[in-house]
């Protein structure tokens, strides 16, 4: 058991370091994914013209270190959930008296990821609000932000929207987790079979698996993040209303805004973890 604890600690430290290293890509993904909503909030004058333009604009108007804005909240959310998930899955694997079917495996994976969201979703919400909180476009230089840290996000949201405001988009986020878990369980055996005797192909194969399940749930991720941005403001009537509104006003391509940054992050993240003898095949929000 002690060895298991050491392994989990090492895994969490490695994941935390990688998440911090790739935080700039996460912020760019969030900015591009939600740019239409940010424009409506009056904090962006025009859409970004691709990943490079988003990076350049953010650094030019907010500074280089602003690329890590929201990372602390994301670390708390992701690492806490990962720790709980690892413990639950390890317990499931230790039950040698149970012959796990494919459906049961998917169910265990879904429950292990969905349950912790109830506890740590507010931190994911805070990270999203902070990462999409750009300086006002009136004068970019010296513009004010809406939030000043995680505690400020919680305080203002609770004051304007109550506890429900911290959970905007939760239902669609849980649905996203279910889709990603199903794709993950479906592809993982094939990944193990192909990569077993070919170490050199592992980065490519692992990146492919990660990209597949991330893109399968990406449209739902977009809806969830958009619903987060309505907390404390004009809200969607529900998930279906949010989907219909985005589809009719922005088109289906909007559901994949920022996907390029997400794919780039998946490739680099998966390759890095494989090279450090880890495994990036863990589902994230």
Image: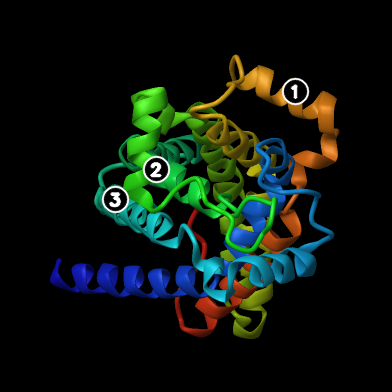
Mark 3 → mark 1, Cα distance in angstroms: 35 Å
Sort mark 1 into few (<14), some (14-19) or many (20+) by Cα contacts within 10 Å: few
Q: Nearer the viewer, residue 183 or 35?
A: 35
Q: Which mark is residue 153?
A: 2
Residue 24 point in image, percent of width and height: 58, 68
As helix, strand or loop, the secondary structure at mark 2 comes to helix
Check the image and report above or below for 244 versus 272.
Answer: above
- Which residue is pictured at 33% across the width and 73% down the height? 13
Q: Earlier in the sequence, mark 2 or mark 3?
A: 3
Mark 2 → mark 3, Cα distance in angstroms: 25 Å
- Which residue is pictured at 39% across the width and 54% down the height? 73
Q: Which mark is residue 245?
A: 1
Sort mark 3 into few (<14), some (14-19) or many (20+) by Cα contacts within 10 Å: some
User: Which of the 4 image quadrants contains residue 172?
Assistant: top right
Residue 226 point in image, percent of width and height: 62, 35
Q: Earlier in the sequence, mark 3 or mark 1?
A: 3
Q: Nearer the viewer, residue 17 or 276?
A: 17
Residue 177 point in image, percent of width and height: 52, 40
Q: Which residue is mark 3?
A: 84
Which quadrant is the N terminus positioned in?
bottom left
Q: Nearer the viewer, residue 107 or 238?
A: 238
């Amino acid at each position: 058991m002690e060895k298991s604890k050491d392994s989990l600690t090492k895994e969490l430290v490695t994941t935390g370091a990688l998440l911090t290293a790739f935080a700039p890509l996460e912020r760019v993904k969030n900015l591009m994914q939600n740019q239409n909503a940010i424009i409506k909030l009056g904090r962006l004058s025009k859409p970004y013209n691709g990943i490079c333009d988003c990076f350049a604009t953010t650094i030019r108007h907010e500074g280089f270190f602003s690329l890590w804005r929201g990372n602390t909240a994301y670390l708390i959310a992701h690492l806490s959930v990962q720790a709980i998930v690892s413990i639950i899955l390890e317990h499931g694997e230790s039950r040698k008296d149970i012959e796990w079917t494919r459906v049961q495996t998917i169910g265990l994976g879904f429950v292990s990821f969905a349950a912790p969201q109830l506890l740590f979703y507010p931190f994911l919400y805070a990270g999203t609000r902070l990462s999409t909180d750009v300086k006002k476009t009136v004068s970019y230089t010296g513009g004010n932000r809406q939030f000043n840290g995680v505690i400020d996000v919680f305080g203002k949201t609770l004051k304007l929207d109550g506890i429900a405001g911290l959970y905007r988009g939760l239902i669609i986020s849980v649905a996203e987790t279910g889709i990603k878990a199903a794709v993950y369980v479906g592809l993982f055996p094939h990944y193990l079979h192909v990569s077993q005797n070919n170490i050199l192909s592992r980065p490519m194969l692992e990146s492919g698996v990660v990209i597949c399940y991330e893109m399968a749930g990406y449209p739902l991720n977009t809806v969830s993040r958009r619903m987060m941005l309505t907390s404390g403001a004009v809200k969607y009537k529900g998930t279906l209303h949010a989907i219909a509104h985005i589809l009719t006003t922005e088109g289906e391509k909007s559901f994949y805004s920022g996907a390029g940054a997400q794919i780039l992050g998946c490739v680099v993240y998966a390759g890095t973890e494989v090279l450090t003898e880890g495994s990036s095949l863990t589902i994230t929000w």
